Amino acid sequence: MLQTIEKINQVVNNFIWGVPAMVCIIGVGLYLSICTGFLQIRKFPYAMKCTIGRMFRKREASDGAITPFQAVCTALAATVGTGNIAGVAGAIAIGGPGAVFWMWVSALLGMCTKFTEVTLAVHFREKNSQGDWVGGPMYYIKNGLKKHWHWLAYAFALFGVLAVFGTGNATQVNTITAAINSALLNYHMISDAVVPTSSLIIGIIIALLVALILLGGIKRIGNVTEKLVPLMALLYIVLSLGVILMNLGRVPGVLGSIISGAFRPSSVTGGIVGSMFLSMQKGVARGIFSNEAGLGTGSIAHACADTQKPVKQGLFGVFEVFMDTIVICTMTALVILLSGIEVPYGAAAGAELTISGFTTVYGNWVSIFTAIAMCCFAFSTIIGWGLYGARCIEFLFGTKVIKPFMVVYSLVAIVGATVNLGLIWSIAETFNGLMAIPNLIAVFLLSGTAFKLTKEYFKNEGRA
């Protein structure tokens, strides 16, 4: 039975994350970019001014909302996860260094897609019975499109609920458990025989922490993410910059291998990765999976922001993709390619490849810091996706099911810490991709509204 489910899921998964889906995601991103005159490039300085410039302003959000900065931190909490460490490594191993170039391309287009999603989410949001702002793809479908399209909203919400337990929780907890156990084993603080008990204890602690944060409501989620996300990003960037500075002389050569490898992978990988299409596929898929542009999930967090300007919040979407993919994913790629480690081209690879890059440059002592970074990345993803799942199940069944859902979601952490997650990860990844279909249809159909809002905003602002 399990083998049958696995085979069926593999077929669906290969399609969802294969050529047709990527063409749709890239196609919509290109369409939005052209129609806005490549806003993500033209208005990039203005976007950074409106986002980074507002981060340091202390302010309190009104009831039922979080500050714009807390909103972007919550969205980044969900996107900046273990995929930034493990996923980039896997893309380079299978697609060669050129995959990084295609990752950049997908991010460039994804900036405009995420901008549009966030703008629509804030424009079409509504308040629930508890007085909280709620929004996202299911709401801009419901409030922006005619009734015969409303089934797309329910499809998105259903796929979202099914995805969060695996993508956002169990697999992330498994990564935290593996990182902590690995560090404890390296320093001979536990033996192999104690690992199952250690995993159970870690799972219980994470479940309690997740429940404590999520049951505190949107304000507590915002308070946690605005502190955790900048801290974890800064730690990882500092460690990565150290690797880059210590290998500064190799940077031009590595950048050259990324560019040439994008079009002639065999010239860099010794013929093991010979397909430009494979390099493109892995890079685009990694970029999409990392920044979630096209999936619509990040807009759920942005819809909670205390703002009356949808387009201005949409600019945080540009910043979000830039930070996630252009900055953090690129840092990971440079650590791997600059450190001098042997990349197993053509074979599967994950976080261990990135960790090897750090330890080769700094020594084994840095493994404790990479473990901390991975734990922060994974835990923040659990919190962000917990909010997404709560909003999706609320849309389907109302506010009464939010707390029971959060309790169940928290308990899944124990499962994630103690069992093998191969099939669970694969199924969750499929549902994750399925969310993109109704969202991209809605974004395309509502693009005219987004263009109108954007034109009016910049006309009224008279700036940048």
Image (cartoon, rainbow, N blue to C red):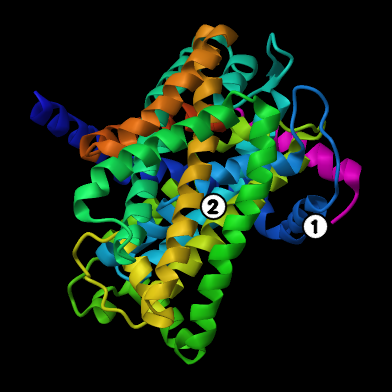
Counting residues from the start of the chain, the first of labels 2 and 1 encountered is 1
Circle 2 Cα neighbour tier, 10 Å, few/some/many (<14 / 14–19 / ≥20): many
Q: Position of residue 209 (x, y in %)?
A: 52, 34
Quadrant the C terminus occupies: bottom right
Amino acid carrying label 2: it is Leu
State the residue in front, 309 or 351. Answer: 351
Q: Position of residue 79 (x, y in %)?
A: 51, 46
Element at badge 1? helix
State the residue in front, 340 or 276. Answer: 340
Q: Position of residue 258 (x, y in %)?
A: 40, 75
Residue at 62% x, 49% y is 228
Residue 212: name its quadrant.
top right
Amino acid carrying label 1: it is Lys
- Residue 31 painted magenta: no
Judged by its main secondary structure, the magenta piece is helix
- Residue 457 painted magenta: yes
Residue 49 disc label: 1
Element at badge 2? helix
Residue at 18% x, 76% y is 271
Residue 109 disc label: 2
* Magenta region: 445-464
Q: Can the viewer see residue 38?
A: no
Residue 156 disc label: none
Residue 197: name its quadrant.
top left
* Vertical comparison of 455 with 349: above or below: above
Q: Position of residue 132 (x, y in %)?
A: 71, 19
In three-dimensional space, the C-alpha distance between marks 2 and 1, rounded to whole angstroms, equals 20 Å
